[in-house]
Image: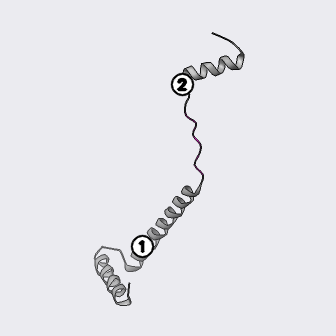
Amino acid sequence: MGVTEETQDIQTKKSFFGRVKGLTWERWQRIINAVTALGATVQACNRTLKAQPKAVVERKKSIRVQLQEIKEKHGTRD
């Protein structure tokens, strides 16, 4: 964004948010900065989560397979 466009953008924001009762331009800037920082934090957390290895999820075994494993473990037969 060029200087002219950025200046116009700032002026537009100042005039729009200047109408909000009790909200000064400085307060609005602090809100923008806080939301921007929060967004950056969320993005960093998402990158961290995506970079972690996915947990290996073991498929649940059927009851028959579980019983068979128990029988084999204890050496029993049908």
Q: Secondary structure at mark 2?
A: loop
Depicted 19 relative to depicted 48: above or below? below
Q: Are marks 1 and 2 in contact (CB under 8 Å)?
A: no
Question: In the rendered structure, which disc, 1 or 2, sits on the residue that comes first in sequence?
Answer: 1
Depicted 52 relative to depicted 12: above or below? above
Look at 59% across and 43% down and name the residue there: 56
Looking at the figure, which quarter contains the N terminus?
A: bottom left
Numbered disc in front, either 1 or 2: 2
Question: Mark number for residue 32?
Answer: 1
Distance from label 1 to label 2 (Cα)? Answer: 54 Å
> Residue 32 placed where, x, y %?
42, 73
Question: Mark number for residue 62?
Answer: 2
Looking at the figure, which quarter contains the C terminus?
A: top right
Look at 35% across and 74% down and name the residue there: 23
* Quadrant of residue 21 within the rendered picture: bottom left
Magenta segment main secondary structure: loop
**Horizontal side of residue 59 vs 26, given as left or right:** right
Label 1 crowd (10 A; few <14 / some 14-19 / many >=20): few
**Horizontal side of residue 74 vs 38, given as left or right:** right
> Residue 52 placed where, x, y %?
59, 54
Question: Any magenta on residue 70?
Answer: no
